[in-house]
Amino acid sequence: MAHGDEDLPRLAAVVERLRRELTVARAEADVAAVVAMARGALMERHHCSAAEAARQLDDMAAAAGLPPHEMAAAVLRQEPPAPPPEPEQSYQLEPADPFAVAAAERARDGAELVDALHAQLLDRFGVIAAAVWLLEPDGSLEMLGQAGLGGTESSRWRRLPAQFDSPQQRVAGTGEELWWPAGPPPADQVPTLAPWGGNAARAIVALRDRTGTLLGVAEAWWPEPWDHFADGVRGGLSAVLAGFAEVLSLRLAHGPVGSTAPSPAVFRALGQVADSVLIVRPLRDPGTLSIADFAIVHVSPGYVDPAGRSAGELAGLTLLAAYPASMSGDGLYARAARVLASGHDEHVRGTVAAPLTGAADEVAVCDLHAAPFFAGVLFTWRRAGVAERLAELLGHAERLGQMGGWQENLAAGTVQWTESVFDIFGLDPRQVPAISTADLHNFVIAADRAPVRRFWESLLRRREAAMTTFRVVRPGDTSIRQIRIFAEPVVGGDQVVALRGAFQDISAHYHTQVALAATRDQLADSEQRAAEEHQLAVRLQRAIMPQDAPPVEAAGVDVAVRYRPAERGHLVGGDWYDALLLPEKDLLLVVGDITGHGIDAVTGMIAARNALRGLAATGAGPADLLRHLNYAACHLSEGIAGTVVCGRYDPDTRVLRWARAGHLPPILVRDGVASTLPLPGGVLLGLDPDAEYEEAELELRGGDALLLFTDGLIERRADSISDALRELTSAAVPAGPDAAAHRDRILSSAVSDTGDDACLVAVRILG
């Protein structure tokens, strides 16, 4: 709506009155807040009611002769807030001011804004040139605009870094005005903008808004030197610049201006490059300068709102008004604050899973970019299409099936893994690159290296799709994972140029793995051979590990052992134990678990048990026994991998020396309290031929009970092994009258649903 020139003074007066009323309201609110906090402090300090605290505060103010708000500030031990300004103290615009204010508010950019200022200064004070710099977050001064200066002269002074010693930076740092009628700036000979040889009169004044926040500095030049500045010139020029700062602060509150603002052409170009563009600028608290909200500066014509609204519905809103729940998580407000603080971009490839609105997004978006943009933050994204949705479905399928795809270019030597593969191996793609098939054998346990190497060689030689399985130890959780690899060669001409396939984590489906491996051969007599092998494994196992072995006899020690076989119909496992009285009268206590099932696991168990018995005859300690046993598992046998805990007890000193190879800790029951023993270091058998093992000592007392066991005793599919171990520790008390009773009670209460076999050795120290 257009107004005639006669309406401009009235309009400007209305604007000034509203601004003053807002200032008064803010001051009154500050005073009321201080008084309310002081009353609350008195209520808490003297345990009185709100009315009594109010009367007490009024009495204290009257006795001290202070206004209530100053007394309240004294109670809170802080500076009193400024009282609301009196009407006669308000600054009244002179007749020429409303036109200048209207021109400044109509300015399209920083150059026109400074032109309006210069026109007013020229008309009233004879100022021939003016320039304004805005204070940037890093302390530098960026020129908003200039009028009356040459382009070459002003371009060299467009940006003044914080560390650059100049009159403008000195005013910005101290807030004190600089006035000099002639010659260079007073005091130091610092660089200065001197369009007329440096001999003209000039002034530099700090620009502040109504809250006192520094916006920047303004400089004015006269065409010739003056003898001195009259008081009217100083006061009048400062008053005009104060009004200009007020208009400037209002303009900055609604969007960037000047050199910090992108031009409309930039907005149009962004709309052509990205489907959805959102640009925000921080709104800071005047007192703390912390971010209070973000102003929405621009949305592109094709803006895709995650909340499902049109771009027009966001007009005039701040970021929190548009998305009030976006301050937490990865919402738009939280992302904007992070990008502004760090100065680094954020990029989310594919469909954005975390809601941008802070609640459930109605519209799925993908390829999110957030980057610093001038003085604010730029967001771009696009609506998720069919391809992105299919990729998301594929990602869910990989996750549910615990699978991941890979491909390898043999000619270029490049390998690509999907994110799911890195998760299967427990690797961080930012730290560890994808592993080539040729190097895969270096990352599996020692017992599986030769089969994996032969698998890769057969792919290149036979040029047929193939599959195999191997075991790895994932970093961090040190758990053994069973992984299946599918691979097919890609032939170009007469050679294999690439490989591609998939990995699958089948640790939780080991029985299915055995069944699938058996079906590969599809031999008519496979079931018969499996039954015979099962019977052989059971017989071997029972021959070596009877279910009710008699306790070993040793001076002062009561030992009870029990092997619990797997449920009928399940595969035979490799759990084993040993309780042997050595020639030196020491007692050897061992519990172990060879990975796998069937005849291989049983034969591995027998080999490990016999090897350890033979090594124990040398008098070596538990750590040395495990080191030699691990060496034999890696080099002198094929396919042995497992966990062991080994102890050597001296009845004379009652000292137990023990070591472990990846096994669960023993449980000590002493004085009616059960606890797991601190674990010495030691990796699983068959993993690293050069592994070293730590040895721990425990001095036992009369009445102590010790439990050694395998995970088959407590392992459950739905619970973590840590939770199951805590339950067993709690159930280990009381110890009972003897080792056999303790053993039987533990076996009757231990819960396991994996169908695996288990071993338990209960030791009771007599005396």
Image (cartoon, rainbow, N blue to C red):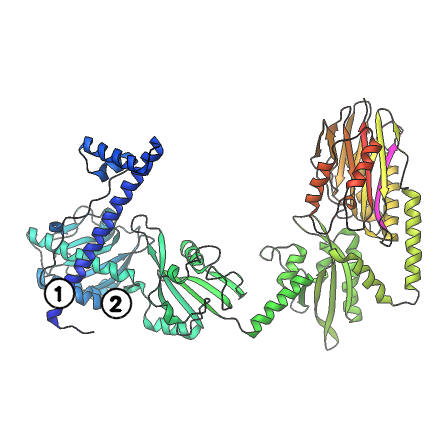
Please provide percent x and percent y for residue 2. Answer: 18, 74
Front label number (2 vs 1): 1
Magenta stretch contains residue 437 = no
Tell which circle, 2 or 1, labels the residue nearer the N-terminal end: 1
What kind of secondary structure does the magenta stretch mostly adopt? strand
Q: Which residues are magenta?
A: 572-586
- 147 left or right, relative to 278: left
Q: Nearer the viewer, residue 48 or 426?
A: 48
Q: Secondary structure at mark 1?
A: helix
Please provide percent x and percent y for residue 385. Answer: 54, 73
Q: Which residue is mark 2?
A: 109
- 195 left or right, relative to 744: left
Q: From what the image shows, is residue 477 above or below residue 557?
A: below
Q: Which residue is mark 1?
A: 10
Whether residue 148 is visible to the viewer of this picture, yes or no, is no
Please provide percent x and percent y for residue 436. Answer: 68, 62
